[in-house]
Image (cartoon, rainbow, N blue to C red):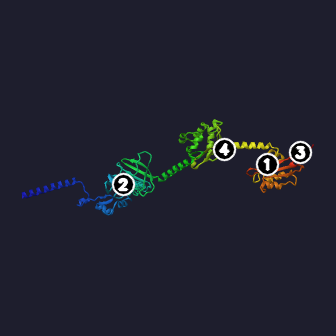
Amino acid sequence: MVQILTDILLVSGISVLTAALALWSIQRIPARPVAQQNGSAGPEAVALLFENGILHHATQTAAHTLEMEPGTHDWEDLWDTLVGRFPNFPRMAHSGSRGSQTLDAVDGQDPEQVRIRWRGDLCWVSLSSVPPEQAHTPAQRAAIGHLGNAAASSPHAAWAVDGDGNVIWQNGAYCALIQRLFPDEAQQSFSPFETPDPGSDPVRTQLLPPDGSPTEWYEVTCEPVGDVTYLHAKCVTAQCQAEEAKRTFVQTLSKTFAHLPTGLAIFDRNGQLALFNPALVDLTGLSAVFLSGRPTMISFFDQLREHRRMPEPKNYASWREEIADMILAAADGRYQETWSLEGGQTFSVQGRPHPDGATAFLIEDISAEVQLTRNFRAELELGQALFDSFEEALVVFSPAGVLTFSNDAYRIMWDQNPDGAFADVTIADAISAWQDRAAADAPWPVIADFVSGAEHHQHKEVTLPLKDATTLRCRMHVIATGARLIRFDRSDPPAQLALENEATLSV
């Protein structure tokens, strides 16, 4: 009996000790997910493997959640599925050297993060939840969403490259540009644009479309952030074409103006010399080096004064004010002056406004014209003095019957001053003045017909009886250019002169 009780106590002690050890062991084991405690496997990761942009493998969870089957779907299908929650999700699968990229969802729903890793032609994509300590607030997720949408919807191409120059992110504009210019996918992992140095001015890069279209120009800027460089390309093709058209137009103008004898100086809206021709160098004596340095208007006229190619100012204190007034008048199109230089040359200077606030000055050497005009005026004065010395009254009418010339004897005889008349004096006006002193039977129709050209005679002579019982001999001639010359004198007629001479000889 005692032996039985001893065995029972021994068994009970061993059981209690075993239970205590088991309980201590259970407390030492870390807690496992419920699924594992129930004997089932943990949740399978949402992961996909792409090769050359084609879905090669996907976990069952990924295939069920994203409704994608290996060999059937490609990267474009995954992009269509995820771009709504991950706006920065790349449009094309990465390829090339090893790299990775992590994107956060904008709506905060599970899964909240996508991770992309690539190496060569293989690209892995996995979706997962973000630990609570790393999760973004709703405001942060909204800001990320807005930034992603802004980058994705930008009309300018934007992309990011890693340290090896591989493109690790791009927006829709960049993808469309690359697909249009470089259909070969092997070139899509590398940026075709020249990357400018950080902090430098934008770099212009030209790209040639494969369809033979004209060259396209892009202005590239970059901003490094850590190991990643973000780049933006703005299409400036229209601007480059406009600049080229402007250069061509300026060259055409330069070639055209190069053969003009008139000096041309065009100043832009900032008052700097933008265009000049060789004639300006010859007329002004200014060096081409000085003019090519784009001097201002003030400097330009200062040099003209130094080279004595413009009139000397009377007052040097007001010189700048005079130049300012000249520039203002030229901008309004009111400046037109004749410069008489010390060397005997004469310049005609005009200032004209040009589009876009520019101002043009035209300098023409009119020395020959001025000299010719002076000589012609001197000849006219000489001729006038010569005819004024005649005792005969002389008057000239143009083929149209307008009085163009008369001498002092004519003005005294008929008490007329044609030069002081406000309007042209015609033959009818002249006959009306002559009738005041002539008799009623004077042959006015004959004179009028001769001056008007009704009579085809080269010479004509008539006698004009005057109211004072004297007569005038009127001799008419056709002279150069069809003009009519009329000569009035009180000389006796030839027959009367012959009789007087005969009587004188008989005595």
First of labels 4, 1 by sequence position: 4
Percent coordinates x, y for residue 154 in the rendering: 44, 55
Q: CA distance from mark 4 to mark 1?
A: 29 Å
Identify the residue position indicated by label 1 in the image: 395
Which label sits on residue 369?
Answer: 4
Mark 2: amino acid: Gln
Percent coordinates x, y for residue 356 in the rendering: 57, 49
Q: Secondary structure at mark 4?
A: helix
Identify the residue position indicated by label 3 in the image: 501
Q: CA distance from mark 3 to mark 4?
A: 55 Å
Of residues 261 and 100, the one nearer the viewer is: 261
Percent coordinates x, y for residue 212 in the rendering: 43, 57
Percent coordinates x, y for residue 51 in the rendering: 31, 58
Q: CA distance from mark 2 to mark 1?
A: 96 Å
Which label sits on residue 187?
Answer: 2
Mark 4: amino acid: Glu
